[in-house]
Image (spheres, rainbow, N blue to C red):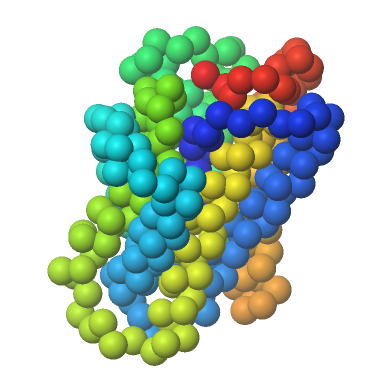
Amino acid sequence: MSNLALEPMPRQWPDPGAAYRRGVVLVLLTATFWSFSGLIVRGIEVAGPWEVLFYRSLGVTLGAGLIVLWRHGGRAPRVLGAIGWPGLLAAFCLATASVSFFHALFQTTVANVSFIFAAHPFYAALLAWLVLRERVARRTWVAAGLALVGVLLMVVEGLAVGGLSGNLLALLASMLSAGYAVALRCGRRRDMTPAVALSGAFALLASAPMVSEFAVPWQDIALCLLQGMVISAFCNSVFAFAARAVPAAELTLLTLLETVLAPTWVFLVIAERPSPTTLIGGTVILAAVMGHALWSLKSAAPSRAFGRPPG
């Protein structure tokens, strides 16, 4: 799953132009790695959703924990304690979103999950307006309404063909990810990276009692750990680093690569074909997100590409 608001540690880039180009490359690479989550889940042969969540969450906890230790050393416990209630809320939202996201992958197509999840920046904007009283531009309301039409198309299709639960779980994951982003914004003056490790621990504790059989094939365990340590923990840290040099509007546009690639991989490798309704709904959502990103990019001042991170 993609996370768009992780607060980076303060760091000065040596040259703004080089930093921007490096940031764009890192975001594209990160989005590409994120897009393999669905294919990884489809490659798991024996493990069920709770087993996948358990070993994936173990990978997130270990991976993000090692990153925190590497960045802070002996100060890691103090940094963890400093995240406060925003960090705890962010960890809870991210953990619950992970549970919903991976269960959705077991109950509907990767295309459905990817397209429905792509609308989460608009939910974050709405939640930030309600909770933080942040201004929401008119273009965001228009794009959010258009994206909602696309989501509803796929949810209604799920009701008709018996895949409603998977679509609703994807929708829940998208909304919880919005809550995660807003919680991180509440704690934006602190290093919130430990919240990623804590989210892994929460999901680990939640999934452990539900696991029916821990002795799954090593191939399945390896795939789960790969998703948790590399695609979730490591890529989120790389994304946070890159976000210091790339404007928010461009970040939204660049990360759309994940939404396009995720269903493409499963179609090419295992021939999982999205339905016509999914393609229509996904096209509507992508049009909303891309239109909003391009509009924002055109309206944003170029000087905002550098300097302090958003917020």
Compared to 122, does 226 lie above or below?
below
Residue situated in front as seen by the camera: 123 or 27: 27
Compared to 158, does 148 lie above or below?
above
Give the number of marks. 0
The image quarter in which residue 105 lies: bottom left
Q: Residue at x 61, y 20 (%)?
A: 308
**Is residue 231 something one can see in this rendering?**
yes
The image quarter in which residue 239 lies: top right
Q: Is residue 107 left or right of residue 135?
A: left
Compared to 66, does 269 lie above or below?
below
**Is residue 142 something one can see in this rendering?**
no
Q: Residue at x 66, y 68 (%)?
A: 265
On the image, the x and y values in percent for residue 192 come to 40, 36
Q: Residue furthest front?
A: 74
Residue situated in front as seen by the camera: 147 or 297: 297
Q: Residue furthest left?
A: 209
The image quarter in which residue 36 lies: bottom right
Q: Residue at x 53, y 35 (%)?
A: 8
Compared to 268, does 104 lie above or below?
above
Q: Residue at x 53, y 62 (%)?
A: 230
On the image, the x and y values in percent for residue 4 come to 53, 38
On the image, the x and y values in percent for residue 297 come to 74, 23
On the image, the x and y values in percent for residue 288 come to 64, 33
Q: Residue furthest right?
A: 17
Q: Is residue 287 left or right of residue 224?
A: right
